[in-house]
Image (cartoon, rainbow, N blue to C red):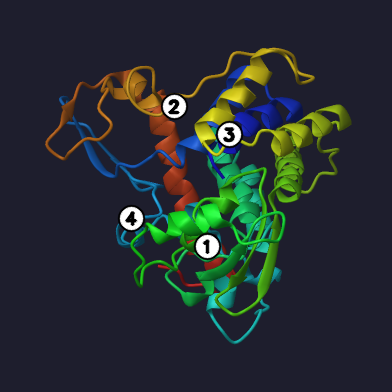
Amino acid sequence: MQIDFHHGVTYVLARLAGFDDRSANIIAHSAQYVDDATNSGVLRFDSGALFSRISSAHKMLDYRNFQELANHFVWIPFHFLPGNGGLPAGQDPSDHFIDKLICRPNSAVAQDMVRECIRERDHAYGLHRLGITLHVYADTWAHQGFAGVNHRVNEAKDITGSDGKPDRRLLDRLANYFISEALPLGHGAVLSNPDKPFLQWGYTNGRGERITRNNPRDYLEAADAMCRVMQRYCLGNPDAEVSGLPQADRQLIQEMIQNIRDDNGMTRHQKWVAAIQAGKFSFGAANVQYVAKGQGSWKFQAVGTVRESDSENDVFSYSPTFLTSNWKLFHDALQAHRLFVIHDLLPHYGICAA
């Protein structure tokens, strides 16, 4: 998924679930920032203070940079959550370990990840972790059928469009890419097809299975499930019976998913932002913006830098407000999420991923 869903739609869902504007902005910003948190390592301050953070994305989230992406441990905990074949803990989908790693929509693994996030909601970074969790949760629909490791299961051929005919545009783009052994990483073999809400398409996977994908249906299902997660978060009960999307808003979200058909995610995002500002949804008009880097960004507000990246030699001016800044709390949540997923959640399902 791209910024239109991770930020724009997530904000809408948060407001529909009952969050106020401030909280919804934190949740949505955190959900998108998972794709933009590209720096890792220690941050040094002039006071002698230190802050260590991890990255959740590569600085060039580009399907041409396969080998570089493979060197960054971000795919499994943040983008391709293993699905254990959709089975509960203690059951194995097959004798092949790769079948445990393949991402599955709304898997038992994903639901347990959500439950932990709700149980841990009282931390200062609770809303930030919710946004991160929702990013990963949403991607279980978009990235279904693919695994966050280099494996032939991620191969794709005979890619077709909604008319069932070969997708010539995608095939031409693939022809311009450097195809290497690193290609079967995530959904690199189909480029951004899983991340475009409006697409209906198909392909034959690395096992020779014919896969048909209906992104509008999957994205709407994800939106309703995300709304339910946030309603349960508000109640503090991960198993509460909740209503999900209001019918009128659900219809509008469905129409926008289907009818906003720009290839560029930023362009689609602006159309969601415009709809929010125009008061199209039942919660009324709101001003929403997202700044990933530079002036006005969370990092700028926290440490005063406008640079997109930093090095170990950089020294920043320390302020006590850093401890409560959204940027710092996001990175706290990022580490809490990854620690739980890698060291508690996945081992519970018999998955050793690090």
The numbered disc on residue 192 is none
Q: Amino acid at mark 4?
A: Asn
- Decide which of tag 1 and tag 4 comes sooner along the chain: 4
Q: Tell me, yes or no, whether the two marked residues, 1 and 4, touch with CB atoms within 8 Å.
A: no
The residue tagged 3 is: 4
Camera-near label (3 vs 1) is: 3
Q: What residue sits 44% from the left and 44% below the top?
A: 334
Camera-near label (1 vs 4) is: 4
Where residue 50 sits: x, y (%)? 23, 36
Which element type, helix, strand or loop, lies under badge 2? Answer: helix
Camera-near label (2 vs 4) is: 4
The residue tagged 1 is: 344
- Decide which of tag 2 and tag 4 comes sooner along the chain: 4
Q: What residue sits 61% from the left and 71% below the top?
A: 204
Q: Quadrant of residue 75?
A: bottom left
Query: The C terminus appears in which quarter of the rendering?
Result: bottom left
